[in-house]
Amino acid sequence: MKVLLLNGSPNSRGCTYTALTVIERELNSRGIETELVWIGNGPIRGCVGCGGCRKLGRCVYSDDPINTIGEKIKVADGYVFGAPVHYASPNGATISTLDRLFMAFGGYMKLKPAASIVSARRAGTTASYDVLNKYIGINNMIQVPSTYWNMVHGSSAEEVYQDKEGISIMRAIASNMAWLLKLLESAKGTELEKPVDIPKEKTNFIKQI
């Protein structure tokens, strides 16, 4: 069993990374393999809604790390999406990354456990946490709970470690993630392996008169 942790911060070893490493260590201690992926600090284009990924099975653009991360998405059993708060929202690169990953590779993530975490010096965390959770909610995934909202505070890795409650929240995410993964593994080959599939029906809010 393997969990992919995505660091959406432009800082490879900053506060978001620090929170993710706490989760990673706890998962490893519970026998879960991990891979921590940094999206980098280069430009990542936003999704243009072209629909090409539905035909190709990958994003049509290959000049950034999205398709490389997508290949890792395919084989992971669980996910943690981490982002810093910029202007009371997840940073733009994380939003662009998740838009395209979920559009092109979302099918591989369905019915798998996932958690989102956010990092900020002070404010904007709850709004950012809500944005990230909507990716999980729309994609038929299992949202991993914790003991409070999934956030840490601080301006440096050292300050994040001083946020004792935040650190305990990260550890609880990992503990719950490991438990869920083992439950899902134990259900394989039984009638409990997957829920009954309910086809999605799309409707509009606008009706023709």
Image (cartoon, helix red, strand yellow):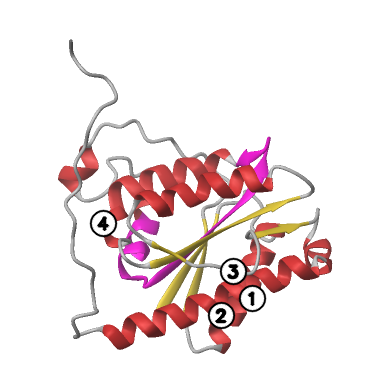
Cα distance between the residues tagged 1 and 2: 6 Å
Instruction: Name above or below for residue 187 compared with residue 21.
Output: below
Q: Which residues are magenta?
A: 68-90
Q: Say if mark 1 contacts mark 2, CB within 8 Å.
A: yes
- What residue lies at 51% left-to-right and 39% top-to-bottom? 43
Q: Calculate the distance from the C-alpha at mark 3 to the C-alpha at mark 4.
A: 25 Å
**Figure check: 182 above or below 120:** below
Looking at the rendered image, the quarter that the N terminus falls into is bottom left
The residue type indicated by label 3 comes to: Ser
Q: Quadrant of residue 150?
A: bottom right
The x and y percentages for residue 205 are 29, 25
Residues marked 3 and 2 touching at CB (< 8 Å): no
Pointer 3: residues within 10 angstroms few (<14), some, or many (20+)?
Answer: some
Type of amino acid under label 1: Arg
Q: Which mark is residue 146?
A: 3
Tell whether position 159 is magenta. Answer: no
> How far separated are the C-alphas under marks 1 and 4?
28 Å
**Where in the figure is residue 167, as x and y percent of width and height?**
72, 70
- Whether the residues at callouts 1 and 4 have beta carbons within 8 Å, the answer is no
Q: Is residue 14 visible?
A: no
Q: Nearer the viewer, mark 3 or mark 4?
A: 3
Which three-letter amino acid code belongs to the residue tagged 2?
Ser
For discs 4 and 2, the disc positioned in front in the rendered view:
2
The residue that mark 2 highlights is 175
SS of the residue at dot 1? helix
Label whose residue precedes the other's in the sequence (1 or 4): 4
